Amino acid sequence: MSNAEMTSVVETSQQLRVAILSDSDKQSQNLRLLLESSGMDVVDEQRLSAASIKQLDTDCTDVLLVDMDDSVEHELDFLDELLESPIPILFNDASSTRMKVAQRNSDWGRMLTKKLANIAGFTDYQHSAQQATPTIEDSINETIVDSEPEIAEPAAFMIEAEYLEDIEQQAIHRVKDEINHEQEEIKDVSPPVSTAGIAARNVWVIGASIGGPQSVKRFLANIQTNLPVAFVLAQHIGSNFVSLLAKQLDKVTTMNVIAAKEGHLLKHNEVIIAPTSERITLDKQGYVRLKPMECKSIYTPSIDTVMTDISMRYGVRTSAIMFSGMGNDGVRGSQLIASRGGRVWAQDADSCVISSMPDSTRRAGIVGFNGSPEDLANQLDEHFKTNTK
């Protein structure tokens, strides 16, 4: 496509209007230069805070780019405002963006602008710049993962799904090999894990990405009390967000919502949020065990890995729900859960911010129920009314 044709496409679909919220003024300036060189219109540029989110002009903004630095503490009201914002949001991990990883002539910039356009519904948008300027490349750097085994922690939501295939498959095989090494037969995992009715007997893994916090919030708000189920939430999110998300979700449900802690006994009516820098597993007695991430994943946490680890321990008593998100993380984990007798449900496309994650799971032919977050909560209640296991 020629430059004239690219310009024509951008003009026809109008300029994509982006607001940037960042913990760093320098990082914000770098991102603005990159987006403007790609034909986008940066309509606002502010420091990351609850007040700045309130000030956003929702009528003049198509998508919000949130650039977070894990070393910066954020107040609780920041997440409140973010969850309530009607503007589609793309998160970026500031620390990984600055790292010198696999530089490829502004591939990262093209990926970023493509994601922003897709989230905002600009399906005809084309990257209008042939190459970002050297200054932008030097200061922002690339986050596309190459074949080298040593990679930095990547930015959330920035990478296409196909880069995940080898990494996720390796993670699944690694978990299987580890359990076999411990001489645990898969067929013996299906019976209840609980002891004396204390530990959870049924575990549902929730997978979510972009739009997930809002959807999960609605889901948990409609869950009936005293259901014989515990949840493990694998939400693509910056590590600085995990504790804040737990506090926010805990406000809307009678269940206990906490970030994963080593040695915690998982019980019914609890929601454990998987960490982004450690691998969450459950031992034979149902205690949380946090282990090092031996295999890096593009998305953190890897939904496939969380689902695989839980399913390997709980067998048929593991089920899954796929919520709003981009990419196909969670498909392989859901397939494993389904193959071992667990249920797989998904949020319907109409109620998702981005439906590609649940859509990918649906295409795998393993989804037994689709619905809005409220529908999914009601269906879970009905399920346990007729199934007391």
Image (spheres, rainbow, N blue to C red):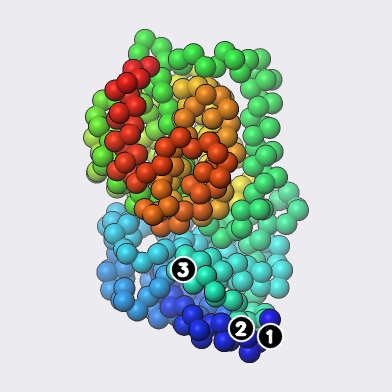
Mark 1 Cα shell of 10 Å, populated few (<14), some (14-19), many (≥20) = few
Q: Is 172 or 283 nearer to us in this picture?
A: 172
Mark 3 Cα shell of 10 Å, populated few (<14), some (14-19), many (≥20) = some
Q: Residue at x 65, y 18 (%)?
A: 182
Query: Residue most toward the top?
Result: 196
* Upstream in sequence: badge 3 or badge 2: 2
Number of numbered discs present? Answer: 3
Q: As drawn, is 276 to the left or to the right of 80?
A: right
**Amino acid type, label 3:** Gly
| Residue 6, label in figure | 2
**Amino acid type, label 2:** Met
Q: Residue at x 61, y 83 (%)?
A: 6
What residue is disc 3 on?
121
Residue 21 falls in image quadrant: bottom left
Q: Position of residue 209 (x, y in %)?
A: 46, 51
Q: Is residue 258 above or below residue 248?
A: above
Q: Which element carries disc 1, helix, strand or loop?
A: loop
Whether residue 126 appears in this view of the structure is yes
Q: Is 14 or 185 nearer to us in this picture?
A: 14
What residue is disc 1 on?
2
Q: CA distance from mark 1 to mark 2?
A: 6 Å
